[in-house]
Amino acid sequence: MNKLFDLTGKTALITGSSRGLGFSYAEGLASAGANVVLSAVHKKTLDAAVTKLKNQGYHVTGYVMDVSKEEQIIDTFNQLDKAGIQIDIVINNAGIQHRQPMVELELKDWQRVMDIHLTGTFLVSREAAKRMIKRHSSGKFINICSLTSEQARPTVAPYTAAKGGIKMLTRSMAAEWGQYNIQANAIGPGYILTDMNEALVNDKAFDTWVKNSNPAKRWGKPEELIGTAIFLSSAASDYINGQVIYVDGGWLAVL
């Protein structure tokens, strides 16, 4: 049974992984035996994350990469090639949030959210898949969806559109790359206790709404996503493709 979930010998690239959920995914996959490649925009926080994982005895490297910049993505993969690092698993985690009513939303803010979430997921996956296909190896892609991949809420239109797009991009990846023994699936986190959600957690009315609307009656914890990430990265999910697993405490089930 352990062999199904063992990631020993695999290398995973996790975008936006210097902190938050991205770091949790990286730490989780490393604990399952994977070598991990962290990437983030800011070198200082990236270096700190790499050091933290190395101090735990894990094999980890870090690359500064802005997923909204195609040239940086291509350059990073070229650096990986030169270093002899072959990526077997990709978790497209990098993301931002921008809350504003649509009638006040500027194009640049809409575009930035779309570039980082949807276009960034496409570009990183394209570069990784090219190399997997060329070397005739299997691969795993885990994209990060959201409850807003299924349900809209006010003031987060670009995020909602991007996350809905990621759901369909995941299916497109499965349709095109499944023949190469590459699986593309997604995780849809529910309301999780993260830095990005700190303002919502501290909003008493919103906090009460989250707890009352969820069968679990609480927020999720970052570590509660790790098992799903390991599962979708491992041989245990080899015949699962194009799916979204919502880790939401049952929130979507009762809408």
Image: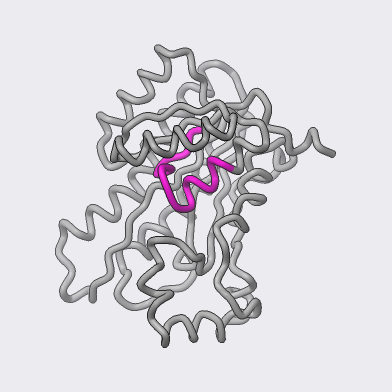
Q: Position of residue 223 (x, y in %)?
A: 60, 55
Image quadrant of residue 141? top right
Q: In this view, does 231 lie to the left or right of 185?
A: right
Relative depth, front residue between 181 and 67:
67
Image quadrant of residue 3? top right
Query: Which residue corresponds to the image point at 58% horizontal and 74% vertical from the top-left?
Result: 252
| 109 over 179 or under it: above or below | below
Query: Which residue corresponds to the image point at 38% horizontal and 23% vertical from the top-left?
Result: 77
Q: How is the image coloured?
A: one colour
Q: In this view, does 240 lie to the left or right of 107?
A: right
Query: Which residue corresponds to the image point at 30% horizontal and 35% vertical from the top-left?
Result: 43
Query: Which residue corresponds to the image point at 30% horizontal and 37% vertical from the top-left?
Result: 44
| 5 over 115 or under it: above or below | above
Q: How many labels does the image show?
A: 0
Quadrant that contains the N terminus:
top right
Would residue 70 be counted in the magenta stretch? no
Would residue 25 be counted in the magenta stretch? yes
Relative depth, front residue between 64 and 175:
64
Q: Where is residue 242 in the image (x, y as percent from the top left)?
A: 59, 48
Q: Where is residue 195 in the image (x, y as percent from the top left)?
A: 40, 61
Residue sitting farthest toward the right: 1
* Chain part drawn in magenta: 13-27
Relative depth, front residue between 247 and 150:
247
Q: Where is residue 40 in the image (x, y as percent from the top left)?
A: 35, 39
| 156 over 255 or under it: above or below | above
Q: Is residue 126 left or right of residue 43?
A: right
